[in-house]
Image (tube, grey):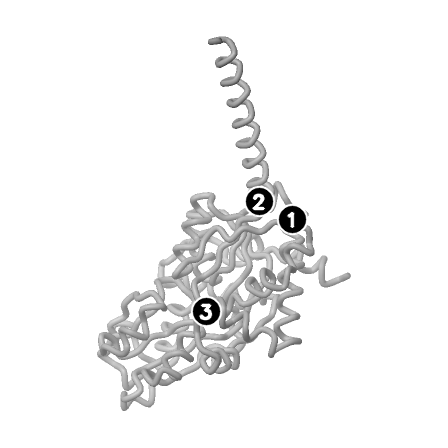
Amino acid sequence: MKKKISILGIVFLLITLGVAIRSSAADLKSVRIGYLQNDIHQLACWVALEKGFYTQEGLEVKVAGIFKAGPELMSAFAAGALDMGYVGIAPATAAVANKAARVVVLAQANSEGSALVIRKDSPAQTLGDLKGKSLAVPGHSTVQDFLLRKAIAKAQLTDQQFSIMVIKPPEMIAALRNKDIEGFIAWEPFPAKAATGDVGRVLSPSREIWPDHPCCVLAADTQFLGSRPEEAKKMVRAHVRATDFINQHPKEIIPIALKYTGMDEKTILQALKNVKYAYALNREAEKEYVHFLSQWKFIKVEDGSAFVTRFVNLQLLNEILKK
């Protein structure tokens, strides 16, 4: 009797191990992606999910994380929790340059699409009118942090003339409403929501600070890219298809944007006017980011051009576009 029980136990254990092994194998086949919470810049990811572009490419994609800001997403890359992700190019650059994560950029997700917002009742007409006031950025070394510092320099002002603090974008509008801050710079749809919610107004869209500037990108873990290049290429192809879909079917993307941002239609329509969706990234613009980050000591690289050559890998994108 004991032998029968023992045999049954062994069989059960083998079955359990078999299930675990199959489950583990299935997890290894999936591509783990991450993106930023409510960030309409990353609409291509949501379109690819909703329209089945990943599935049509023969991919099994798993959303492994939704993050409040770029540095958090890069920490997930560093922890080995992501294979690919949609993130701002600045935090990705900072993480790689500081050897906190090992990723490469495979395509751009969008250009422009941010704005400096102030309280609706603020009398300010220029950035100079905000001297001595509190302004919020999503995080240091983010694209928005770069844009604010660029705007300050352009106005011949200094950072020391402002109180710059870090607040996650989902919390910025409440801080503006409560007068905890005088203004913020964030990605869409948060500037649009501040306006449609009758809380704030746009002082400067990012296109006025830096026309056609790159913003979010599709990045891949270097180990994933090296060991699973065909899947990476399929991910880029799905991204290209999704980006083209956004530009060719503007009405069909609205329900998707509503679903993933939780915003109202009026806000989404206003936000979309401020974003350009494109997959080709300008390396010269990235070199300017690298120079800025080096200048402010967020990173230290000996040769900015060489760094960008390694960091921005558009080979897969170019192969896809040639066909």
Classify mark 3: residues with Cα within 10 Å, few (<14), some (14-19) or many (20+): some
Q: Within the image, what quadrant is residue 284 found in?
A: bottom right
Classify mark 2: residues with Cα within 10 Å, few (<14), some (14-19) or many (20+): some
Residue at image x 30%, y 65%? 166
Residue at image x 68%, y 51%? 58
The residues bearing labels 2 and 1 have C-alpha atoms spaced at a distance of 9 Å
For mark 1, give the secondary structure: helix
Compared across the picture, whether 183 is left or right of 92 comes to left
| CB within 8 Å, label 2 to label 1 | yes
Q: x, y percentage for residue 233? A: 66, 53
Residue at image x 49%, y 18%? 9
Comparing 131 with 247, the one in front is: 247
Where is mark 3, residue-wise? 261
| CB within 8 Å, label 3 to label 2 | no
Identify residue type, mark 2: Phe
Q: Which mark is residue 224?
A: 2
Comparing 68 with 292, the one in front is: 68
